[in-house]
Image (spheres, rainbow, N blue to C red):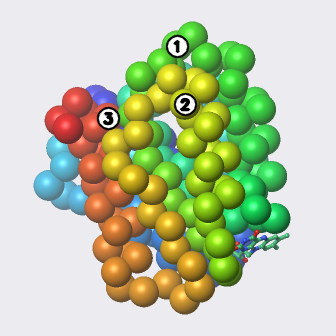
Amino acid sequence: MARLLIVHHTPSPATQELFEAVRAGATDDEIEGVEVTARAALAATASDLLAADAVVLGTPANIGYMSGALKLFFDTVYYPCLNDTAGLPYGLYVHGNNDTAGAVRAVEQIAEGMGWARVRPPVEAVGAVTGEVREACWELGAVTALAAAGEV
Ligand SMILES: Cc1cc2nc3c(=O)[nH]c(=O)nc-3n(C[C@H](O)[C@H](O)[C@H](O)COP(=O)(O)O)c2cc1C
């Protein structure tokens, strides 16, 4: 069984909507052989990551950066996982009130440093969550789950 890990910081209804859409895509009935685990960024461990075949990261933009919670996750896993997660497929979604660029850049820099492989461009959502954003998150979850199974 392949494993997809979703590591998310979800402090509000808008970020909850994005997270739920990602999880719905990842757990779609048509995707077989993938076990999906979601962990709050403040609770996710190096063991969770080492067990994963792909990961989706989700964060709000906070002061032009990723959330402190997701940063803590990276601080926790960086050295313990550096050698063993090279090539890990990953996806990213970011929600902000006006500008997600700094958060995306920060996550992509660290992911690149770990040698992870982005499966598709990040979902960047600003303000009210639209159907289009929900759909993009659903697709992000589905495609990253397929990547966990080695199918994309
Ligand atoms: C401390 C703090 C810093 C924030 N910094 C940014 C920011 O730099 N850019 C941005 O677009 N949104 C920023 N926000 C807004 C959050 O990204 C937003 O609250 C989050 O995505 C959830 O959206 P919601 O409040 O509409 O539910 C910040 C929020 C907080 C609490």
Quick check: is the Cβ at mark 3 less than 8 Å away from ligand 1? no
Q: Name above or below for residue 49 compared with residue 66.
A: above
Q: Quadrant of residue 151?
A: top left
Residue 36 appears in view: yes
Disc assigned to residue 112 = 2
* Amino acid on which disc 2 is placed: Glu
Between the residue at mark 1 and the residue at mark 2, the CA separation in whole angstroms equals 14 Å
Q: Mark number for residue 43?
A: none
Position of the N terminus, as image quadrant, is top left
Q: Helix, strand or loop at disc 1?
A: loop
Count neighbours of disc 1 (C-alpha within 10 A) and say few if under 14, some if 14 to 19, many if 20 or more: few
* Residue, disc 3: 148
- The crowd level at tag 2 (other Cα within 10 Å; few <14, some 14-19, many 20+) is some
Judged from this view, the residue extending furthest toward the top is: 83
- Specify which label sits upstream in the sequence, 3 or 1: 1
Count of numbered badges drawn on the protein: 3
Real-space CA distance between mark 3 and mark 1, rounded to the nearest whole angstrom:
15 Å
Q: Which mark is residue 84?
A: 1
Where's residue 3, x and y in %?
A: 38, 34
- Residue 39 shown left or right of residue 139 in the figure: right
Q: Nearer the viewer, mark 3 or mark 2?
A: 2
Q: Which of pointers 3 and 2 lies earlier in the amino acid sequence?
A: 2
